[in-house]
Image: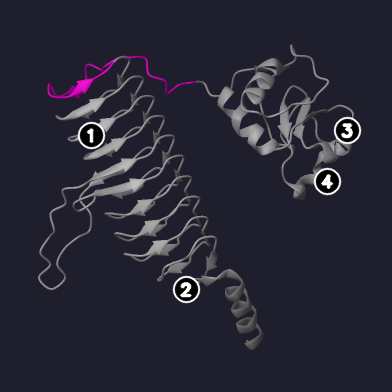
């Protein structure tokens, strides 16, 4: 990790409308960002969870991102950097620490195959053993990792990072997205006529909104006729299955091993815990939280928190758990 000047940190946070209060000199340099228990006297640390309050007295860091109400818990050797939301500040600072190893260098590997009917814009990096199929357009500053297959019928917008062994077809990836290793996007979904098992041909596509992240080995199937949609600023973890014709709104957070069956519509600001399952053809509203391992079989209105199988209001579910435990 590269060293960071406090001036860089301040400028970044101020640019993102975060006020910073500290007595630290602008020229002060931090070797890195570490947790409370691991930070040395050359590092920056952060405090964002009250369960670690007792650990603050032993912190060795040079400085700590912290809310004003907790600064008195820091020892004298650690200078407070007072911000309203230390964890948000940490998230922003972590991007300064990036070595930018996945920024495009504009080099097309001689071991990559690029179809003559594809269209590559400026500064696209294509690594060894990639295949770029026909009817594919890749815009500026895109990085494509080794052994990935892109196309046909694909548009990759600017500043997208695609890691190794990714397959993308029949899709539009909007700008600033990150696709992690092994993801499969735009393939044919799980669709057939039940009695005869006659396969249904899929002719739709996938659209992934800008600034979204798709985890490793996640699969997003193309729609039968229309579009499978992932909204903007969404974060989808590893090993998630999103079936054909699913529509997910903006700012989704979906943890690992979630399965969403076909044609379900999900609103914005959704949070879905790990290993939850959602049946097909449902409507799930905005601002809904689905607890881990829940099984959703019915529509969920806006602003609800559900848990269990079948999924129900989380307070009802908790009462059932307590009642059942008392019977034992």
Q: How many labels does the image show?
A: 4
Magenta includes 280?
no
**Is residue 213 found left or right of 85 in the rendered image?**
left
Numbered circle sitting on residue 154: 1
**Residue that badge 2 annotates:** 309
Q: Which of 144 and 139 is in front in this view?
A: 139
Quarter containing the N terminus: top right
Residue 201, placed above or below residue 300: above
Disc 3 from disc 4: Cα separation: 12 Å
Quarter containing the C terminus: bottom right
Q: Where is residue 191 in the image (x, y as percent from the top left)?
A: 19, 60
Disc 2 from disc 3: Cα separation: 48 Å
Q: Can residue 233 be seen in this view?
A: yes
**Residue range highlighted in magenta:** 100-121
Disc 3 from disc 1: Cα separation: 55 Å
Q: Position of residue 50 (x, y in %)?
A: 77, 48
Instruction: Kindly report which numbered mark, 4 or 1, lies closer to the viewer in this rendering.
Output: 1
**Is residue 236 found left or right of 223 in the rendered image?**
right
Q: Residue at x 74, y 39 (%)?
A: 47
**Residue that badge 3 annotates:** 75
Numbered circle sitting on residue 101: none
**Residue that badge 4 annotates:** 54
């Amino acid at each position: 990790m590269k060293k960071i000047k406090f001036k860089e940190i301040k400028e970044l946070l101020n640019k993102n409308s975060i006020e910073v209060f500290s007595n630290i000199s602008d020229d002060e340099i931090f070797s890195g960002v570490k947790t409370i228990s691991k930070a040395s006297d050359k590092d920056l640390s952060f405090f964002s969870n009250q369960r670690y309050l007792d650990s603050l007295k032993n912190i060795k860091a040079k400085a700590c991102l912290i809310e004003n109400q907790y600064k008195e818990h820091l020892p004298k050797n650690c200078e407070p950097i007072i911000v309203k939301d230390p964890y948000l500040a940490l998230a922003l600072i972590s991007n300064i620490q990036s070595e930018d190893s996945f920024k495009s260098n504009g080099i097309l590997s001689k071991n990559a195959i690029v179809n003559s009917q594809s269209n590559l814009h400026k500064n696209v990096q294509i690594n060894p053993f990639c295949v770029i199929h026909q009817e594919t357009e890749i815009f500026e500053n895109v990085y494509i990792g080794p052994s990935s297959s892109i196309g046909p019928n694909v548009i990759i917008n600017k500043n997208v990072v695609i890691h190794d062994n990714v397959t993308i077809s029949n899709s539009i990836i909007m700008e600033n997205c990150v696709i992690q290793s092994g993801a499969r996007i735009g393939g044919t979904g799980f669709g057939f006529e039940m009695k005869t098992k006659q396969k249904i041909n899929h002719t739709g596509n996938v659209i992934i909104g800008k600034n979204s992240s798709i985890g490793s080995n996640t699969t997003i199937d193309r729609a039968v006729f229309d579009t499978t949609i992932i909204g903007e600023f969404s974060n989808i973890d590893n090993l998630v299955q999103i079936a054909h014709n699913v529509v997910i709104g903006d700012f989704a957070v979906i943890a690992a091993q979630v399965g969403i069956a076909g044609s379900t519509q999900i609103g914005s600001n959704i949070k879905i815990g790990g290993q939850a399952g959602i049946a097909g053809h449902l409507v799930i509203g905005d601002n809904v939280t689905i607890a881990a391992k829940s099984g959703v079989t019915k529509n969920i209105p806006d602003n609800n928190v559900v848990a269990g199988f079948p999924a129900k209001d989380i307070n009802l579910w908790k009462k059932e758990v307590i009642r059942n435990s008392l019977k034992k």
